[in-house]
Image (cartoon, coloured by chain):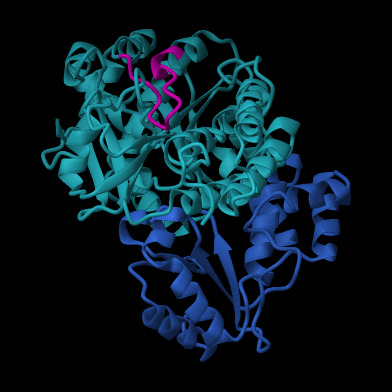
Chain colours: A cyan, B blue
Amino acid sequence: MKKEVLLSASQPELGSALRRAVGMTPADVAFEVRNAKLQGRGGAGFPAGVKWVLAGGASGARKYVVCNADEGEPGTFKDRVLIEDHAERLLEGMAIAGYAIGSDKGLIYLRAEYPYLVPRIEEAMASMKASGLLGSGILGKFDFDVEIRFGAGAYVCGEETALLDSMEGLRGEPRNKPPYPVNTGYLGCPTIINNVETFVAVPHIILNGADWFLALGEGGDSGTKLFSISGDVERPGVYELAMGSTIGELLDLAGAKDVQAIQVGGASGRTIRGDETSRVLSFRDLPPGGSVIVFDRSRDMLDVLENFMEFFVHESCGQCTPCREGNLQLLHAVRAIAEGEVCCRKCLAEFMSLAEVMKGTSKCGFGQTSSNCFVDIVRQFAGPVAGQGGR
Amino acid sequence: VAEGVERHGGGRGSVLMLLTDVNRELGYVSEEAMREIAKASGISTAQVQSVATFYSFISLKPRGRHIVRLCGTISCVMKGSQEVLAAVEKELGIEAGQTTADGAVTLETTSCLGLCDKSPAMLVDDTPYSGLTPGKACEIVRGLRKGGGA
């Protein structure tokens, strides 16, 4: 069901959540976010409050609050829209995080593709500072300042440890975990890294309470979720729905006809058939990152898959073999299927098993999910077994 | 580089910011610049190069005064970005990845620009353009060659 909180036209007064937060103990603020079961809105779904509680309890003279604004998943633009329209709320959420974990330094890692958002963020920073909601002596209780850092065009830097390496001036290659960023993050200090949408949700949680947030969701999910919908729809754009809504409800809002396939969660997400409209947008079923791309029956899904595999081959950091080589082999496989060269079940089974190996042995979320689209599309839409080999 | 070191401070952590600044200023990062950055950050030139080559937005080859990045991801492809690309290539007389002989424009294709609600889209230097048609895109790049835009 459509439910507007983050995008609502009637927004709570700026700073009211921050005021409420500083009336609580920092630990209680972190507990509130944990109890709200706010799952990472970038798409991985890790409970944000757990990060906050752990980082709050970690020892370290310096701690950092990092906002992941490296929105690179194909088809995702919700964070861009949030920054355009709600940059102040984002900063308020980050400041609340700073208070909760005991950090005086926030960093926004902004993707290089969004340079035009910088003036907007700077304007928001200036107005927050002018109202005493950012900078030193916030509400007479704590200091918290925010700085913008830039990516330089690398999808993998949205992975939180690659993002940290990139901010430290290195190649953006994911680190081994553990240690986790909550203990050993930016420059080795305890660090929380949350998505733009996650931070924007925080002030609403602090103002209305964890129980209110839990009740927003459907079927046991909590909160609302933003979806960027594009492709073959009449009204592409960003929609906010209760977490746990069905894909059919979203399609109705955006206006989709003659749907062949829907990809939920971007290139690394899952691809389902157009008639599976009762599937649920939830970490229980279709993990919702932000991207929903709709394909009507005129689309050749093998072309779509080739585009995605080219993307993954280009963006793999190359550090681990399953991801670096696996994506390349799958790209070759897509092209071979298109040419009608892979037509036996045996060859196909080999590629499916490679996809499985990539999932199980890649170092980070990139390689663990990049074969999803291959498996889903070849199985359901375009494989020789599906009877459509060759073009 | 010296200016950048003043702005960001030296040290290992500022390498990417220094590279980004030089890349923006010159349109690319020269070997000389990488040596300077290495000296300022106390690491080897090879290490600086390894960072520089990792990121799509940083170039080691000289590029044009303007950089046109056309989105090549699926939502834009579905709305005709390939036709836009073909038209712009014809207009400029170059292929994606090349620079016009007059040094005005470098044309690149890029991963998703996050403008999928207004596809097809491109980024010209720091400015986004969306809802493109072949005609509209050609007009924009023609303007760049005439020395318009910044």
Residue B98 x/y as whole percent: 67, 75
Q: Hey, which residue is sitting farthest left in the picture?
A: A10
Which part of the image, by quadrant, shows the N terminus of chain A?
top left
Residue A147 x/y as whole percent: 50, 42
A167 over A115 or under it: above or below: above
The residue lying toward the viewer, choosing from A109 and A2, is: A2
Q: How many labels does the image show?
A: 0
Residue A155 x/y as whole percent: 56, 44
Q: Residue at x 45, y 34 (%)?
A: A269
Q: Residue at x 42, y 78 (%)?
A: B137
Q: What stretch is highlighted in magenta?
A: A37-50
Q: Looking at the image, can residue A87 be seen? A: no
Q: Which residue is drawn at 44% across and 67% down?
A: B81
Q: Hey, which residue is sitting farthest bottom in the picture?
A: B146
Q: Looking at the image, can residue B29 be seen? A: yes
Main SS, magenta region, reads loop
A73 over A16 or under it: above or below: below
Q: In which quarter of the image is residue A232?
A: bottom left
Magenta stretch contains residue A242 = no
The residue lying toward the viewer, choosing from B40 and A174, is: A174
Magenta stretch contains residue A46 = yes
The residue lying toward the viewer, choosing from B64 and A284, is: A284
Q: In which quarter of the image is residue A23?
A: top left
Left or right of A26, for residue A6: left
Left or right of B53, for residue A250: left
Residue A326 x/y as whole percent: 68, 36
Q: Residue at x 33, y 19 (%)?
A: A38
The residue lying toward the viewer, choosing from B8 and B70, is: B70
